[in-house]
Structure formats: structure tokens, C-alpha cells
Image: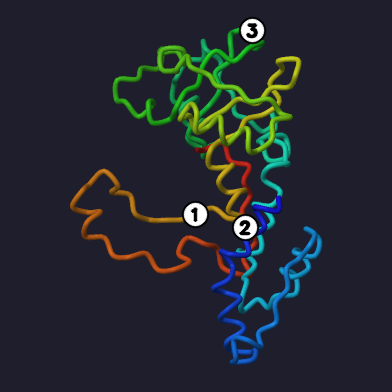
Amino acid sequence: MQEFMKKLVKNLDPKLEHYRETSGPKDEDELPTYSPKTLEAFLQIIKNTPFSVLSREDRATIASAISFRDRKVSSIMLPKNKITFVFEHDFLGPLMLDRLYQSGYSRFPVLSSDGRQVVGVIETKKLNSLEIRANDRASSYMSKTVYYLRDDYTLEQAFAAFLRTNSFFYIVINDQGQVVGLLTYKMLVTHLLGYEPKDDFSSDSNLAAVMKRGRTKEGAGKPEQNQQEPNDNSQTS
């Protein structure tokens, strides 16, 4: 934690230096220096820093980063009672497809016919095919690869798992193997940053478009300062 605080203070130094230049003494030798000895003292400095120096989003990011290592998956996961499940033998007729699209999610856990275990994951992008017929079953379009996290994993362990598998979607289980929720890469990043990054650009596979794209303005993608923090309980990735 001490090493983390040193890096955080170093990254914040440009903002604090700007504040000193506009409001503090001009002589560098006269600048007050203070190194917090405890996490509480550091947080007090953050709390007392004017919003002109650290915005609400900056504070949220700092708070999220500090708690990232110790916070549990269960604290940010989408709980089981809010998950949209699909059964492997469900027909992908108009009503089912409409239900999935209307949910706003992009991935759905597929349950066995008895509902006892997750047997796959289905993505809405695979359901955009014009070849889908009303009598096609979900099992025909699902991926059988399922990744799991335990609900008592720390967010650092979860992040390592995402990087290790390159998966964006995890089923969360308890120590008895029961499904208790799900976690996506988007939810994890949103928690870590304190906000959900936004960008209307969608031509990342177009070399010319990326070359010609204008520079992103500083702070683009952050919510407005007075905007309510986004809900990270999203089943999308």
C-alpha cells in the first residue's frame, strides 16, 4: 500500500503543482512539503483538495484504486436474480430473440435443461444471422467454454483471470459451486476507473479511419462532474 500511495502521489503531482502555482508561494524553496504517514492522512489530503484540482471523477478513481486489491467480486457482480438466463433447449423464435434484445445485454449464460448447471454462453451477435429459424435451439449457437470466478475472489484476482483467459464474461460461483452472479470486464474496468469510458468511435478495424481520427480531448469519456455515478451492474462486456 505504501508503494501504491507513492505512485499515486507522483501521478497527482502535476495537478497539485498547478494549484500551488496559482494559490501558493512562488519560491520553490518556500513550498510546504508533507508526506502522509497513514492511509487516513492521505485520504484527508484528498478530501481537503479543492474540486478545481481534483474533480469528483478523479476522487472516485482514487478511491476505487485504493480499494481494488481488497474488495471482493461479490461486491460488484451482477447478482443471480438479475441475470437473464437461456435454457439449452429453448427455441430461438421471435419472442425469445425479442426478449434477449430487449434486455440490452450482449451475453447470456445457457443452463442445462434441468437448470442445474451452466453449459455455455450465447452472444447476441451470433443471433443476428438471417439463417436462424424459429425451431433452432439455443444449444446450436452457444459457446461451450465457460469461465468461473468465486465470489470471494479479490478484484485483483478477477482482473488477473480476465487477462489470463482473455475472456470478457465470467460466471460467479460460491464455494459450493452454486451460481451466485456474473462479472464482466466492463463492470470491472468501470469500477476501477470510477466511471464508464465513452467513445463514439467504432472503426477500430479500419486503418485509414484510425490514422485520420482527431485527437481525443482531455477528459473525454468521463461523465459530467455532477452526473450520478453509472451503475456497473451490466451483463454486457
- Give the alpha-carbon distance from disc 3 to disc 2, as whole Å: 43 Å
User: Label 2 is placed on what type of residue?
Assistant: Thr
The image's mark for residue 197 is 1
Q: Which residue is mark 2?
A: 61
Could you tell whether 219 is left or right of 187 in the image?
left
How crowded pointer 3 is (Cα within 10 Å; few <14, some 14-19, many 20+) is rated as few
Residue 58 position, x and y percent, is 61, 64
Is 181 in front, or is 110? 181
How crowded pointer 1 is (Cα within 10 Å; few <14, some 14-19, many 20+) is rated as some
Name the residue at 62% across, 70% down. Answer: 55
Residue 120 position, x and y percent, is 51, 16
Number of numbered callouts drawn: 3
Residue 26 is drawn in which quadrant? bottom right
Could you tell whether 215 is left or right of 160 in the image?
left
The vertical placement of 143 against 59, above or below, is: above
Dot 3: what SS?
loop
User: Label 1 is placed on what type of residue?
Assistant: Pro
Residue 159 position, x and y percent, is 57, 36
Name the residue at 38% across, 56% down. Answer: 200
User: Label 3 is placed on what type of residue?
Assistant: Asp
Residue 92 is drawn in which quadrant? top left
